[in-house]
Image (cartoon, rainbow, N blue to C red):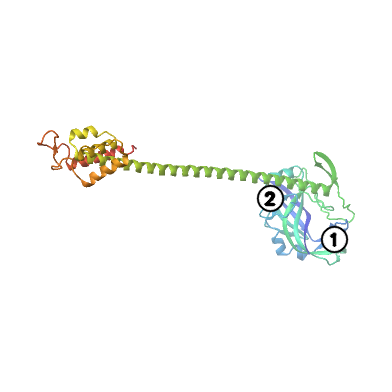
Amino acid sequence: MNISRFDTSFITGKMEKTPEGFYRGNVTVTRTGIFEYRNADGTIRRELRLPEEVFAPESIETLKMIPVTNLHPMQFVNSDNAHVLSIGATGENASRDDQLLNIPITVTHKQGIDSIDAGRRQLSLGYNLELEPTPGVYNGQNYDAIQRKIRYNHLALVDAARAGSVASLRIDSQDAIAVEYEMFPENKNMDGGSMKVMINGVEVEVNDLVGSHIAAINNRADAAEKDACGTKAKSEKMQAELDEANDKLQKSEEKVAANAANSDSEDKIVALAKSRAELLVSASKRMNADEYKLIADKPDREIMVAVIAKARPGFNADGKSLDYIKARHDSIVEDDQPANPTDSQSTFNADSSQARKPEQNNDEDHASAYQRQLDSFKPKA
């Protein structure tokens, strides 16, 4: 039968404070012999711890580097709760002293150090074992069962040792009272002494065992509250980081959209500039310099009407839609009919049949005008 046990232990020598403020000492964690436990019905059961079980290498190995806790936790210490429950640890150098098993401990957490300073100086082991229900006699004493395969989990700092045990920490020579290690004497009252605890703000005197249990519950509640506060703080921090990331993502998406819109706008501007430049170059090829100057700054519609009128004298644009005007203009451009029937590089005066010298109508001038028009419509940086 696999069960759990909580037994007492004590300090040999004295607890010393390190330069860091830690407590360090050597603990007798257990012994061989008969241990007494109270059954649920109030009767006493005696369990034997044989030397071959107490000093078994595989058992001692589980005693090394285990957590020291402030009172016994509601459940054994594991990787999920060690950061909340642990106030220190045992060492690695376990040693045998006749029928006693010793190991060094170090208390590092302020909660545990403050508890020791306040008078909490007794210790209790928490461990699992397999109970063999075989009665017998050991060194003249009867027992009801044998503890096998002892496996340790933690060592608790407690207010009062289990009834029948006296175990305490020796802090220094001034308050040191020699430890009288008297485990389960036959004439010891199993009810133990008494202690005062706070219940709902009221100080109540209770049995040591009850008091230790209440203290353990309070300690676990404090640890749980602290853990919950830590979890809430982590959750709020994660939420804040998530909100910040979402804000950055939204701003990034808005920037991308704005860039895309700007890009589309720039493309449209360039297209309009190109169309305007082509219209002006086309008009300059069909008109003389004076005619061109009169329409160069006019809207596209008026320029197209002028080009049409030049090619189709008598054309009347009144009432004509922009689409109609554009279609007529494009048709003339496609036909590539110059405004004057003579060489396209020459310009004729409407009132004279004599040719004049071309004015800014050569191919180089057209190209330059085209480029200037494009440049004028480009967005400024």
Count of numbered circles in the view:
2
Residue closest to the eye, 142 or 269:
269
Residue closest to the eye, 305 or 204:
305
Residue closest to the eye, 61 or 176:
61
| In-image side of 249 versus 142 (left or right) | left
Residue 21: image tag: none
Is residue 50 something one can see in this rendering? no
Location of residue 312 in the rendering, given as x and y in whole percent from the top left corner: 21, 40
| In-image side of 360 versus 183 (left or right) | left
Where residue 265 sits, quadrant-wise, is top left
Is residue 89 something one can see in this rendering? yes
Residue 88: image tag: 2
**Residue indicated by mark 1:** 46
Q: Give the secondary structure at mark 1.
A: strand
| In-image side of 376 versus 249 (left or right) | left
Q: Is residue 54 above or below residue 235?
A: below
Q: Give the secondary structure at mark 2.
A: strand
Could you classify mark 1 by the number of other residues whose Cα lies within 10 Å: few (under 14), some (14-19), or many (20 or more)? some
Spatial CA span between label 2 and label 1: 31 Å
